[in-house]
Each structure stands twice: as structure tokens, then as C-alpha cells.
Image (spheres, coloured by chain):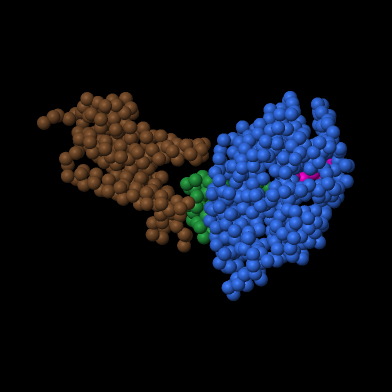
Chain colours: A blue, B green, C brown
Amino acid sequence: MSAVAAFRVDPRAPRLLAAGLHGPLPRFLRRRELDGLMAEIEAAGLTGRGGAGFPTAVKLAAVARAGGAVVVANGTEGEPASWKDKVLLSMNPHLVVDGAVTAAALVGASEIVFAVGRANRTVRKHLERALDERSDADVDVFVESVPDRFVAGEASALVNRLNGGPSKPTIQRPSVRGVHGRPTLVQNVETLANVALIARYGAGWFRERGTPEEPGTVLVTVLGAVRSPGVVEVELGTPIHDVIQRAGGLAALPQALLVGGYFGAWVRARDALELPLTNAGLAPLGVSLGARTIVVLPQDACGLGESVRVARYLARESAGQCGPCVFGLPAMADALERLDVDRIHRLVPLVAGRGACSHPDGAARFVASAVEVFADEIERHRRGRCRSTNHEPVLPLGASGEWR
Amino acid sequence: MEMTMHLRLNPILCDGYGQCAELLPGLVELDEWGYPIVPRRALDRRLEPAARRAVKMCPRLALSLERAA
Amino acid sequence: MRSLSNPAVWYLMRGSGVVTLILFTGVVVLGIATTMRFRPGRLPRFVTLGLHRSVSLLAVLFLGIHVATALADSYAKVGLAQALVPLPSAKYGLFLGLGALSLDLLAAVLVTSVIRHRLSQRVWKGIHWLAYASWPVAFYHAVGIGTDKTSGWFVDVAVACASVVVVAVFWRLLALRRPYPKYLGAES
């Protein structure tokens, strides 16, 4: 999928995407220093940048308590609308590796695995080149290419793959029993990059940007009807219309935005453009940051058609392990195509929360938001019309490949 | 904090046999595809023997009884 | 006319053998019915599974009687090793060995089912599938061992058992063509 050609970097916020501007990483040799760093990360209020937004310090502490841990740097990014991890790894791999090495010291791990998606070979090349340039003596480092399935980046699915199985979720928690059966820290690469920054500059510096409740900067993929689609780095709390401005501004009148990726939700453009980019700010619309993508749907596109395509894609991407997901997701896609809103309302509670991972939950949330935001489009379709004058698809899909 | 028994379903092991719904008719219902909807709330004491039977009868061993707060 | 030291034992051995075959036929059919999520009329499905388990225990009981009497009977001249280890014999050719093989396979199925919760699903399932093999082995043992080969009633029983298993297996194989999950019908 090469719809997004250029990845622009905004020079106004060069933290994560500023290659080579950061000084040497301090060495953490003594227990005291590690405890100090852990406290610093907690004070910084860093949360996961992978989608779940879990407090990083808590996660680190949980894995550190057990011994013999493994660190997995998750750069798989199975979400087709998201490019931020690929961009970060290509542009600033050293920062990510710094973060992984620091995290390994914090949790007492002697092994780091960098996981990337198989299809994008440039990312792997950049990462391997960076690793060749360094000599982090106290850790064993591996790079693994994993299948480009939507759920392949889910923590337990990733661990499953690294243990030789398919990229399918399990009910085993990685922090308890992960790679080789050892406690495993699975952390998004952007989160690790932030760990490296905090290790250098401290919590106070980290908190200079963002909001008090949600501090720091984030990478956001902006796609759709914008002039320069790509990945931008903005501080949390930036109003959405500003984020879109960083991506060159609107290329057409917006109808709706898809916020948070394919597990996120549609919002009406007029409701969302003023809101700040934070979980708290987006909560009134029932949306969270999720995979940190914003797709702008122009006025002349059919939100319903786009949603049906994505709903079918999500159904194809089910790991096929749990009945409610295997059957419920195609049923929701069918109902959406048939404009059967009642059926969708009945299906959503039957599907959400009844799988081993959050795939059915995310799909249900996505479909429910489509039904709400595109209610008038549904009416139009019932009368045999469609607002779309341009049927070019806006939302990118991935190619469903193998599971191993 | 009071510890209560909870009936837990492993959705990956579950294959929709539905024996549990037959043994716990008031508690477990089957969805339209034959898969059980197991409520997360604490199990009524009186249903515990039936729940144990359901755990033993499940052909996939997908059910378990857990003590939790 | 041979003189048999213990005709009662001899008849008990053959009788319990036939009953075991009939019971195991029932077990195989009930096992297939369980997998097919079969509901016997208005009775719930756990009855099918419950019967499958109970009948299999009963079958093991009769199998125990069958083996014990075979060992005890001086005319049959079956040693313990021959009963447990599949070996060709001078007296019975392959057929005693088939009985021993069937016994071994069933022992594996029984033991794994009892300690099910300690095993992985894949291991348990793999061994349980051996049950599909143990039935024809047992059947061939029963038919070929020669003790009742030509009796009319035995032939009827054997044909009935075989027909029932063939039909059940055929029904099971047809269901393999249905999409995941394999045998699910919409529940009413």
C-alpha cells in the first residue's frame, strides 16, 4: 500500500524525530541509579504510545520484580493507517535502541528483540544498520520480522510468534510468561524512544510539553484529505485542526474524521476540529487516541462505503480463535452493508468483550461509530442514493498474508 | 474484601458445544452462533454444584471456577 | 469332542467379548454424536456426552472380564504377555495380537481422559483419535479370532455393529465440509 508517499517531519517539535541531536546515553550501572531512573519515568507520567496508553512506570515495575526478563521493542504496527513507528525506526533508530537498552537495564533483561513487520524491508535495514554501529555489550539483541497481520502487534500475539507459534493472541500475559516462558516487557518503539529521552533530560524536561495529565509529545499519522499526508510530531493537547495544519492543512472540506485507527471511532468534523489531542479532550465524543491516526474524510466521499470496506477487512483479520469474533465481525459488516442498524445495535454487545483480545471490541466500536456518524448517509442509501461523487477509497487496507 | 467464586470462560478453547448453557440454564445463555455468554459477576452460591458439573462436562475444558475479589 | 476344564469360563470369555464389542460400538457412535453436537430428541446435549463417558466405563469393565477370563481359561491358553503385547501367535495367527493392540490403544485413551486436565488439548485429542483406530482393530480381532466365526447370531451382531459405525463415521466426515466451527448448527 503506497498511498502515503512522503513522510514530512515538522521542525517545530524535534524531540522524537530529530535524529542525532541527542547526546550520549548515560550509563546506569548501579542499583541506585536505576531506582532513580524508574522514579524519574514515573514522575514524567509517560504512558504507552502503542494504543492502550498504560502507565509505563507501572509496566516496567511489574516486569522488573520477576527475574530473567526479556524486552520486546514492538515496531510491528499492524494498523494500515498508521506509519509512525515505521517512520520513527527509519529516521531515528538509535533513539529507539537507546530506549530499549535503558528499559532492559531497568527490568534486568539480558535479551532485547526488535519486532518489525515483514513487508517493509527499509525499516529493518535502517534498524540493522543502527545496531551494527553500536556495541551494547550487556545485552543480546535480535531483530525479528513478523507477519503483517492486524493483530500481530498485540502483545500476546507477538510473544506467541516469537516463541515459534502463529501471530495469534493467547490468554497468557507476557509480563508473567512471555518469550521463552520468561517475564517479558512488550513496549511500543515510540514509548521506548521517550524512555531514552527521559533518561537524558529528566521528567521536568519531558513535562515541558503536553498537558499536566497527559504530558509529552506524540507521533501522529495524518491521512486522507490533507495536503501533505504523513507523520507529524505534536505535543499532547494540540487542537486537532492544528495537527491537521502540520500535515499541510485540509485539501478538501472535511465530512468526518476517523480518530484512533480502525479500533477508533468516527467523529463529525465540525465536532472534532476544535478538540485537543488528548484522551481526556476526546472522551466527550467517545473517542481515545488509540493508534494515533487521524484520517480526514472529505465531503464527497462515502463514509458508509469506507466503513464497510474496513469492517470486512477487520473480519478477515480475525485470528479465528473465538466464536463471537469469527462470526460476529462478518455479521456486523453484512449488517452495515444491508443498512440494518437494529441488527448492528444488537450485535455490538454480543461481540464486544467476548474474545481473547480486543479485536472484536475495536471492530464493534468502529462499526457503532459509523452507524452514528453516517446516519444521514444510511438514509440516503436507503433511498438508493449515495453522496460519493468520487469512489476512490480513502482508508488504506493491509494485505492479509500468512500467520507465521 | 470478600472473595467470591467466578465462572470463567476461555474463549479460545471454547468451541460452542453449549453443554454449560444446558447445565446452568439461568446463568449461561447461548448467542445466535451457539457460543456461551458467561456473565462476569460473582457466582450465586447455590449454583456452585451445577457450575462444577459444567466445568467437568465441557468437552474442551474451556470453563474454570476461580476465586476472586 | 474336546474336554474343556472350565466351560463356564470359556463361555464367559466369549460372551463378555461380544458385549464389549457392542458397548464399544456404542461408545464410538456416542463420541461422534457428541462432536456433532447432537441433541437426542428434547434431551439436552450433555446427556450424549454423559452417556459416552458412562458407556465407555461399562465397556472397560466388560473388557476387563473378557481379558481376565481369557487368561484364566486353560483351553484358550492366553498368557499375560500375549494379552498385553501385540504379537502373532501360533494358535491364533494375528488375531490375538489385534486384541492386545486394541486393548493398548483403549488403555491410552482411558488414562489420558482421566488425567485430561493435566494434558494439553492437542495431546489429549491426538490420543483420543486413536480410539477411531482401536474400534476396527477390536472388530477385526472379534471376527477373525475364530471362536464364533460361523455362528449365525454372531455374524448378525458383527454386521449390525459395523453398519452402525460406518454410518456414523460417514455422517461425521460429511460435517468436515462445513465451515468453522465445524459442526455447529444454529441453536434454536
Magenta span covers which residues? A43-48
Residue C157: x and y in percent read 24, 46
Residue C86 or residue A330, whichever sits in front: A330
Q: Which residue is at 76% across, 60% downward?
A: A250
Q: Residue at x 67, y 45 (%)?
A: A77
Is A45 included in the stretch rendered in magenta?
yes
Q: Position of residue A239 (x, y in %)?
A: 82, 57
Quadrant (top left/top right/bottom left/bottom right) for the N terminus of chain C: top left
Towards the viewer: A33 or A287? A287
Residue that extends furthest to the bottom in the rendered view of this protein: A383
Q: Main secondary structure of the magenta part?
A: loop
Furthest residue to the left?
C1
Identify whether C94 is placed above or below C132.
above
| Residue B67 colored in magenta in the image | no
Whether residue A247 sits left or right of residue C33 in the image: it is right
A176 with respect to A401 (left or right): right
Residue A259 visible (yes or no):
no
**Closest to the observer: A392 or A94?**
A392
Residue B1 spot, x, y in % from top left: 72, 47
Q: How many labels does the image show?
A: 0
Q: Is residue A381 visible?
A: yes
Q: Which residue is drawn at 61% across and 32% down?
A: A180
Residue A64 image offset from top left, x and y in percent: 73, 34
Q: Which residue corresponds to the image point at 33% horizontal and 35% vertical from the top-left?
A: C102
Foreground residue among B57 and A174: A174
